[in-house]
Amino acid sequence: MNPHGASERSWYAPAADAQPGAVDVISALREFRSSESAMRRRTRSSAAMGETDLLALRYLIDADAAGVGIRPTELAARLGITSASMTSLVDRLVASGYVTREPHPSDRRAVILRPTPGADEEVRHNLNQMHKRMLEAAESLSSEEIKAVLHFLVRMREALDSIDSRVGATPQ
């Protein structure tokens, strides 16, 4: 376990005189993800919310801020869950007072999910300390470092998105 309660294999930074390599970058990224997961577990238990619930709420808050309504099917696709799981998730969030179902403006058979006004405050309250510390770390980077990190993260996302759902297969 790392100091944050993560259970993945620990990563140790290369010695000061060693030149870090690509494997060290991947190891550091793994350690970051492990720490982030552990922090989210701690946050979830304090908010009495599941990881998927919290992630769904974040997506809905972001979409609402952008003026976009999200259908349950769109949210299910974004979360990678089944429609049955989506129904249970939405029922939980509605019952907890975090989300409302509203009629779709152009499709009377559909609904739009919207966060309640208090939902944003609740999520911010629970995640504020984490976001503050992460922002401080990001703000400590130089302009060139920011460009390098963004480039790396976009390349990592593209690499992962290009992997077919069959393990190890690449799209044709």
Image (cartoon, rainbow, N blue to C red):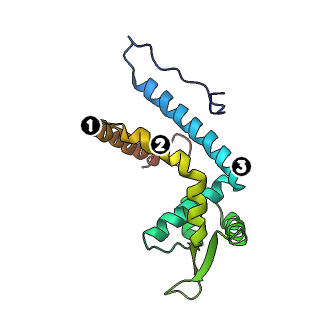
Return the mark for residue 4.
Answer: none
- Taking the spot 52% from the left edge, 20% from the top edge, the residue there is 12
The front one of 132 and 20 is 132
Circle count: 3
Residue 22 found in image quarter = top left
User: Does dot 1 land on a helix, a strand or a loop?
Assistant: helix
Q: Is residue 45 left or right of residue 113?
A: right
Q: In the rendered structure, which disc, 1 or 3, sits on the residue that comes first in sequence?
A: 3
- Kind of residue at disc 2: Met
**Foreground residue among 130 and 148:** 130
**Nearest-to-viewer mark from 2 and 1:** 2
Up the image or down, 54 lies above or below 136; here it is: below
Contact? badges 2 and 1 (CB < 8 Å): no
Give the residue furthest to the top.
17
Residue in the picture at 55% in, 38% down: 33
Q: Which residue is under mark 3?
A: 45
Amino acid type, callout 1: Glu
Numbered mark located on residue 134 in the image: 2
**Taking 39 as reference, is 84 left or right?**
right
Label 2 vs label 1: CA separation?
18 Å
Q: Which amino acid does label 3 sit on?
A: Ser
Q: Is mark 2 on a helix, strand or loop?
A: helix
Secondary structure under the numbered disc 3 in the rendered image:
helix
Dot 3 crowding, Cα within 10 Å, few <14, some 14–19, many 20+? few
